[in-house]
Amino acid sequence: MSHVMNTYARQPVAFVRGQGVWLYDESGKPYLDALAGIAVNTLGHNHPRLVRALTEQIGRIIHSSNLFQIPLQEQAADRIAAITGLDEVFFCNSGLEANEAAIKVARKYGHDRGVAEPAIIVMEKAFHGRSLATLSATGSRKVQAGFEPLVQGFVRVPLNDLEAVRQVAANNKNVVAVFIEPIQGEGGINVSRLDYLRGLKEICDANDWLFMSDEVQCGLGRTGKWFVYQHAGIQPDVVPLAKGLASGVPVGCCVVGNRAKGVFKPGNHGSTFGGNPLAMCAVVTTLDTVKDEGLLENAVKVGDAIRNGLAAALAGVEGVVEVRGMGMMIGVELERPCGELVKMGLDAGLVCNVTADNVIRLLPALVMNGVEGRQVVERLAPLVKEFLARGAAQPRLAAAR
C-alpha cells in the first residue's frame, strides 16, 4: 500500500525514462508524449544542454537563500524582463504561488490608492490554482467545493464579454484589477479573442486598473510568441509565469511593470526556495535554448500542423464539436465526457489528457518536430473516432445537462 496521499486519480503507468518527446515505462514500452508534464517540459526529456547545465550547477551550489545576492537570479530576471517587456521579477516555486503574488500585488495596489476592500475581476471557467485565494479566483465549483468560506474580493464575468466588464466598472468602485488566462487551460482550451484582450486593456487603462495576464500554462512560447498578450499587441501590468519556465525544475515568477512597478517593497512578500541557484540555472538555460533553437517558430509550424491535421481527420465526425487552440496548446472538444480516451491513448502509446470533462488537451514539448506532430494526429484521430462510434447510443453532454 502506498503512503502517498490520495489526491490524484493516477493512470496505471510509471514512466522511468524520457528522450525528446518520447517516454518509456518500466517495461520499456515507448509513448509519444503530447502533454509534456502538463506544459512543463518545454525542451522535452533529457535535453543535453539542460542536463549538462543542471549537473554542473548541482556541483557548484543548489541553495543559498534570498538573504544573499544570487547572480543567476539576476540573469534569469534580466531575461524574463526582456521577453515580457516588464520591469521587476519575483521568483517563487509554482503557478499558484505566482498567482497568489499577483493577487497580493493587486490588493496592495488598491490599498495604496485608498481602496479599503480591493476587488479583482476574474473569468468563468478560469483556473488560477488551489490555495485558498487562487481557488477563490478559480471559476470551478468542483475546485472550490468543501473549502469554503472562500476568500472575498473576486467578481466573476464570462470570458470574451466586454459588456459584462463595463457593467462591473460602472457599478463597483472597489475593482482594482482584471485577472485573465488569455487561453484557459484547465477550463478547456478556451481562447480569448484578440480584440477582446485589447478591449479589456482599454477598460483597465480608462479605470486605472491593473491588467493581469495569467500565462502560467499558455505562456513561454507555447503559442508561437513568448506570451499570448503579445498576439494582441498589448502590455499587461502583471504576468504570473511557471510551468514551462524551467523545463521541469519547479519554478514560478510574478513579473510586474507599468502601473504595478514598485508596488511590492522589502518585507511585502517572500519565498524560502524562490529564486534558488538550481532553478535559476534551469530558467536561464531554458529561455536561451528556446531562443537558440528557434522553438517559437517551431511551436507555430508543428502546432498548426497538429491542429489542422486533427481538424481534417475529424471533419464531419459525429460528436466532434471543435478543434481549437494556438500553437502547441490544442483542445479537441467532444459532445460528451471522454475521460476514458486517456487510457485508450496510453494503450496506443500516446500521452494526452482530458480536461473540463469533454476536451482532449494536447500540450507537446516545444521541441516536437513535424514528423512527431503527424504521429500525434495518426495516433489520436482513430481513437477519437473509435470512442465516438462506440458510444453513439449514449446520451450527449448537452442532453445530459
Image: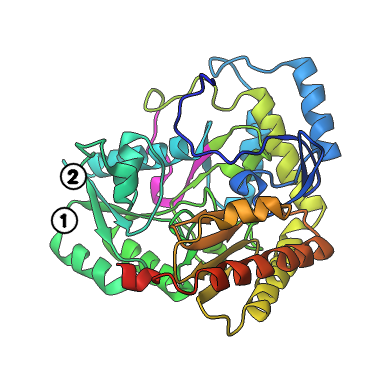
Please give the residue where the numbered disc 2 appears in the rendered image. Answer: 115
Mark 2, secondary structure of its residue: loop
Q: Position of residue 45 (x, y in %)?
A: 77, 41
Q: Are marks 2 and 1 in contact (CB under 8 Å)?
A: yes
**What is the three-letter code of the residue carrying label 1?**
Lys
Quadrant where the image shows the C terminus: bottom left
Q: Position of residue 7 (x, y in %)?
A: 44, 33
User: Which residue is rendered at x = 81% and y = 65% of the image?
Assistant: 370
Q: Position of residue 252 (x, y in %)?
A: 54, 37
| Residue 150 in the image: above or below residue 86 | above
Classify residue 11 by image quadrant. top right
Quadrant where the image shows the N terminus: top right
Q: Position of residue 8 (x, y in %)?
A: 48, 36
**What is the three-letter code of the residue carrying label 2?**
Val
Comparing 68 with 244, the one in front is 244
Badge 1: residue crowd in 10 Å (few <14, some 14–19, many ≥20): few
* Segment colored magenta: 253-265
